[in-house]
Image (cartoon, rainbow, N blue to C red):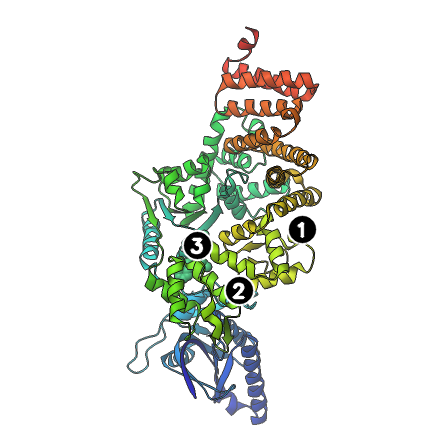
Amino acid sequence: MSEQRKVVTILFADVVGSTEIASQRDPEVVRSMMSRYFMRVGEISAAYGGTVEKFAGDAAMVVFGVPVVHDDDPERAVRAALEIRDGGAELQVRVGVNTGEAVTAAADDRQFMVSGDAVNVAARLQQGAEAGEVLVGSLTHQLTRNAIEYEARAPVAAKGKTEPLVAHRALRPRSEVPVQMRGIPGLHAALVGRNRELRLLLDTFARVAEDRRPHLFTIVGAAGIGKSRLVSEALTGLADSGARVLRGRCLPYGRGITYWPLIEMLRQDTGTGLADEREGALAKLDRWLGELLSDDPQRPAVRARLAVMLGLETAEAIMPDTPAERVEREIGWAVRHYIEAVAHSAPLIVVVDDVQWAEPPIVALIEQLADRVADVPVLIICMARPEFLELRGGWSAGKANATTITLDPLDPLETSTLVSRLLEIEALPEDLRRQIVERSAGTPLFCEEFIHMLIDEGLVVRDGASWRAAATIDQIRVPQGINAVLAARLDLLPEEERSVLQSASVIGERFGLHEVDSLVGGDVESRLDSLRRKGLVSGGDSAGEEFRFRHLLIHDAAYGSLPKAGRATLHDRFRSVLEREARDPQQVTEILAHHAERAFALSHELGLEVEIVHERALKAVEWLFATADRARTRHDTATMDSTLHSIRTTAAELPAGGEPAIRARLRLLEAQLLVMRADYRGASEAAAEAAALAESAGLLSTVAAARLAAAWIWNFSGTGIVTEFE
Ligand SMILES: Nc1ncnc2c1ncn2[C@@H]1O[C@H](COP(=O)(O)OP(=O)(O)O)[C@@H](O)[C@H]1O
Ligand SMILES: [Mg+2]
């Protein structure tokens, strides 16, 4: 008999009042009731991957974690417990579930013996449960509270000399489908280290909530070091605090919209999706503001500014009395007002990821949130790569309510612990372990990816409950650095899977099955399934749900592995798919412009045929103009600026620097941008030039627009026309 120590989850279920039942009914009836019950317990347990260890009297003991460990054993056990509870109406049960270390002994394939304190605790929880109650121990609770809804309850009274047991009452699963039952390898280790950082974050939240004041908490660290993980651990720890969480992320430079992170948060809050038409989105905004600011006199003003930010209204139409250069500040004011209102009733956590890519208005807004939001509990958590602090040396400086921490690499001991947790393996050669620890430079993502790679290569194989190293594992070369590991993993993929991953990377960090399907042939769905099993992508769990790269670095590696000619073709193809299939292409101009611009720039760089380059340049210019126009309506000057820059570079490759029509429209947009920056002199010059260019090209509507702009500038600022008549 081989003995092993491992973490298992034990379930005890017992029928309530079975002796009474037995004394009141016909023994035969009782026997068939009990056997139906035992059969159900057996079926439910098997469905969730548990093993029935024994039926003792009318109590059943089920073990999750033998012979095979799943990293979601606790969740499986609690789900099984709830199903047993809700089962047959004829019998009431009490159930106890507990997770802990136990000694397991396997006599042969089918027989297990599990013993240890974890088992005793599970039994005591079951004995302390009321009829129809599922009680779980503290570790089970901690590991499953994201997946299961719990209720507090009094500890289970002591028996004999032992202390009362902390117990939680499981109510129901939070979702139909278990999070991880899909055969994704169990490569998610319990958190290693980071105790101090986690405590600091939790303490900061406690202060924010108690003192009712804002705090800006910034976590800086390289990609893959564990920023998102730290935040998600903290949020898990705060799951019962009643705090609300709003999340948004900044996109890489030039990928679209300055206000993106805020737009994401608002969409989340109002329940609006990309698919909503303008009217639908406005209606949702109104309904939601009606609740949030029910008798706030500022509601109309907040609504107008948020609608402009969301691109649902233009500033000219809805706030005509506000000078253009003030719109940005006004939007900031409205966002603050909204955040204050949300945080008024419950503590609010605002999470902003990839702040190193935030445009200046977002940076200013976050700082103002921390400075000016008064008397409400708001914790703002920003995550950024190290270049952020180089870019913005003054970030959070001189603020009493700001904390910035750097997430250092894990130290060698921690890294080694992480490797052990990721891979329960005894025969991992010491030299290999040393190399992983050394070459990972303390980056957890490296360890995860490298171990995935060992599995992909068949150098580490699953052997029942644990992993075994193949004899040839000594020959593996450990790449240097995370990018090298990712490149090596991509190399190992079968050609069809790699091409699915590469095509997806052109679409972006998130992508839909249907979108990838439009770019590559073959059975995309099963390839994505395989990529998900390998931990390269995640999501796509329900029909229509987006997929995403499991980490931005995986996306970047896949994109980087694609030859430039391939990238150019795919960007161009995806642009035309979107043009054809988007419900309203005008709602996704930023995305169209990105793909058109990439297709052009890559073709140009590769020196493709001049006709192709020109054709792609014209497409790019078209969508860049549409993007600049949209940015203008939301008074997003940063996006206007970068988009105009792209138009100039692209048009420069067209014969004679683009037609006069392009130059006229460009000049007009420049005039409008200068107005927003209150440079009226520059603006009026640009408007006059735009009018002249348009006139020579015979573009009457552009002439009119330019004249109108010039007149408006003069009327508004007293500058302009004068110079024209001099
Ligand atoms: N301290 C840690 N212990 C265990 N796993 C970790 C730890 N830090 C990060 N990881 C894992 O490493 C991977 C990369 O971490 P992530 O938080 O996404 O990095 P970042 O957000 O800094 O780019 C994730 O899969 C995460 O779960
Ligand atoms: Mg992250």
- Name the residue beneath numbered marker 3: 224
Instruction: Establish if 403 lies above or below 186.
Output: above
Instruction: Establish if 709 lies above or below 545.
Output: above
User: Residue 457 placed where, x, y %?
Assistant: 53, 67
The residue at the point 51 percent across, 68 percent down is 455
User: Does residue 26 appear in the picture of this structure?
Assistant: yes
Q: Which mark is residue 179?
A: 2
**In front: label 2 or label 3:** 3
Q: Amino acid at mark 2?
A: Val
Residue sitting nearer the eye, 30 or 577 = 577
Q: Amino acid at mark 3?
A: Gly
Q: Is residue 525 left or right of residue 214?
A: right
**In front: label 1 or label 2:** 1
Q: Is residue 190 left or right of residue 648?
A: left
User: Residue 619 placed where, x, y %?
Assistant: 66, 35
User: Residue 698 placed where, x, y %?
Assistant: 71, 18
Looking at the rendered structure, the secondary structure element under dot 2 is loop
Looking at the rendered structure, the secondary structure element under dot 3 is loop
Quarter placement of the C terminus:
top right
- Name the residue beneath numbered marker 1: 519
The single residue placed furthest to the top in the displayed view is 726
Which picture quadrant has residue 627?
top right
Circles 3 and 1: CB distance less than 8 Å?
Answer: no
Q: Amino acid at mark 1?
A: Leu
The Cα–Cα distance between marks 3 and 1, rounded to whole angstroms, is 29 Å
